[in-house]
Amino acid sequence: MKVLITDPIHENGVEILRKNGFDVEVAELSPDELLERVGEYDALIVRSRTKVTAEVIEKGVNLKVIGRAGVGVDNIDVKSATERGIKVVNAPIASTNSVAELTIGHMIAMMRWIPEATQSMKSGKWEKKRFMGRELQGKVLGLVGSGRIGTEVAKRAQAFGMRTIAYDPYLPKEIAERNGIELLDSLDDLLKEADVVSIHAALTDETYHMLDYEKLKLMKKGSYIVNCARGGIIDEEGLYRLLKEGHLAGAALDVYEKEPPGENPLLSLPNVSLTPHIGASTEEAQRRAAEIIAEEVSAALKGGEIRFWVNRGG
């Protein structure tokens, strides 16, 4: 059976597939090239660059499984795949540690002005008084969503002496309590209570612009927000207004509604810490993602046990 990998993955994943007896081709194809060639393969593995549209799925007449070497499957038309009986698998645990660590890193960088102080030093200045920061210890961290990544962020935040609260209608209370997280009944209550809000929810119709101007204004004056989950959950125009008005002390973003964000006004603000969607960009996470997706695709093609079957039962 033939496997096509259209985005770069760690060599460990490629080797696992080959050791399992598959004919593997790695080729970074354009959308038109993918449409022309996808019909030759039994499996397709992608990261975020390749868009697996309904048209691609229709052309993939031999496809049995589509693998996403990462967490989000928003670049895959899962509905079309399900309708055609194609399994969609992913690697949701691969980047958990990496994203959690970046989230904490963003909190510290934002609250201690590390990017701005670095630039100041590089320009030859010594501005000790300008960069008065705030500690994490004693602050309340509010998690909007608390699955694998949110829970790992909570553990790390607790080590800094933060109280952790969460709004997550899908998180069982006993699991939250086991991890030292206090569950709140409403998003509004969380926003009003947290000193730092960190987003760990998926982007869906329900969560799109969930945090608009009016919701964000519920946050305490002088509080902070971090988003290392998905762009589009925060209404960026509303966030910009509240940062500009001084209601929010700072924001740290790894994800944006449009990527790259282009001439986004948030990029011009001094109290915004930014990274280019690098939550999963560690050597360890990329190796784990490749290994997990190789095993998942192998299991799907050979009739083995699939751990991370996105459209199971669909």
Image (spheres, rainbow, N blue to C red):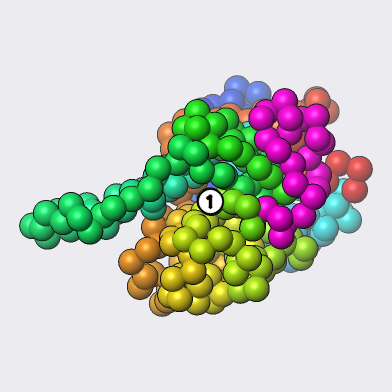
Q: Is residue 15 magenta?
A: no
Identify which residue, 3 or 248, lies in the foreground: 248
What's the residue at 22%, 59% (across, down)? Answer: 130
> Left or right of 271: which side holds 78?
right
What's the residue at 51%, 72% (across, down)? Answer: 242
Q: Which residues are magenta?
A: 168-191
* Amino acid identity at mark 1: Val
Residue occupying the far top of the picture: 19
Q: Residue 248's x, y, as percent?
A: 48, 65
Crowd class of label 1 (few under 14; some 14 to 19; many from 20; radius 10 Å): many
Question: Is residue 167 shown above or below 177?
Answer: below
What's the residue at 77%, 63% (across, down)? Answer: 206
Q: Is residue 183 magenta?
A: yes
SS at circle 1: strand
> Left or right of 204: which side holds 227?
left
Q: Residue 68's x, y, as percent?
A: 65, 45
Identify which residue, 32 or 228, lies in the foreground: 228
Q: Which residue is mark 1?
A: 196
What's the residue at 44%, 47% (across, down)? Answer: 107
Where is the N terminus found, in terms of image quarters? top right
Identify which residue, 310 or 151, lies in the foreground: 151
Question: Is residue 249 shown above or below 228?
Answer: below
Examine the image and state in which quarter residue 92 appears: top right
Question: Is residue 297 shown above or below 244?
Answer: above
Residue occupying the far left of the picture: 124
Q: Residue 38's x, y, as percent?
A: 67, 54
